[in-house]
Amino acid sequence: MVENIKKYYFLVVFTVSLVVISGAYILEFFFNFPPCELCIYQRVPYFLILFICIISFFVKYNNIHFYSIFFLFFTSFLIAFFHSLVERGVIEYSSGCTSSVDDFESIEDLRMHLDSVSLTKCDEILFSVMGFSLANINTIVSLSLVLFNIYFIQTLYGSRNKKS
């Protein structure tokens, strides 16, 4: 039972993470939706999860894999939730990633500011599906994966406790 949980858990987590990362890059490169700073931060936990899953396919089962993935899913949820709040204007993020405009004393100040900020702003929604931005969708996906991870951890320890 424990081996089946391990086998399918990491396979499902790997597949979902790969789909999320692939979707982000497909939107970026094929549909020309450049990511903002927070969008890039949201990708980091998924890359680390992919790395942990690949390692777990080749090494003996270890609890640290489950807990690391749980921590990364929760981190992804927090970043995506924060990004959603920034997009909806609930909280403000750094001026380099938002549409807020400073008062410029000269055209040179404006040019320097434009050179230092990214093209895509964190507080602007470029792409949405049924009213949900990609950050909103990632919040839902990440929270679902946190709950999925909790379910598998409880299933794993539940099966160990039943053997005792």
Image (cartoon, rainbow, N blue to C red):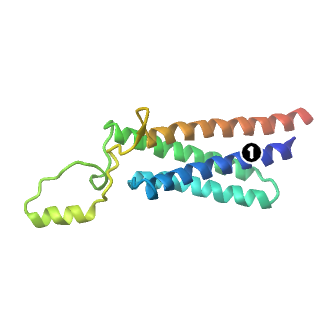
Q: Position of residue 76 (x, y in %)?
A: 53, 47
> Residue shown at 40%/33% (left/top)?
131
* Left or right, 130 with reference to 149: left
* Left or right, 97 with reference to 65: left
> Residue shown at 33%/36% (left/top)?
90
Assign a secondary structure to mark 1: helix
The quarter of the image holding the C terminus is: top right
> Residue shown at 87%/40% (left/top)?
1
Q: Where is residue 97 in the image (x, y as percent from the top left)?
A: 31, 53
* Left or right, 41 with reference to 148: left
Kind of residue indicated by mark 1: Tyr
Q: Is any part of residue 49 visible from this angle?
A: yes
| Residue at which label 1 appears | 9
In the rendered image, the residue lying farthest to the front is 30
* Left or right, 143 with reference to 52: left
**Looking at the image, is 21 positioned above or below residue 161?**
below
Q: Position of residue 31 (x, y in %)?
A: 43, 53
Q: Where is residue 111 in the image (x, y as percent from the top left)?
A: 17, 65
**Looking at the image, is 5 positioned above or below residue 65?**
above
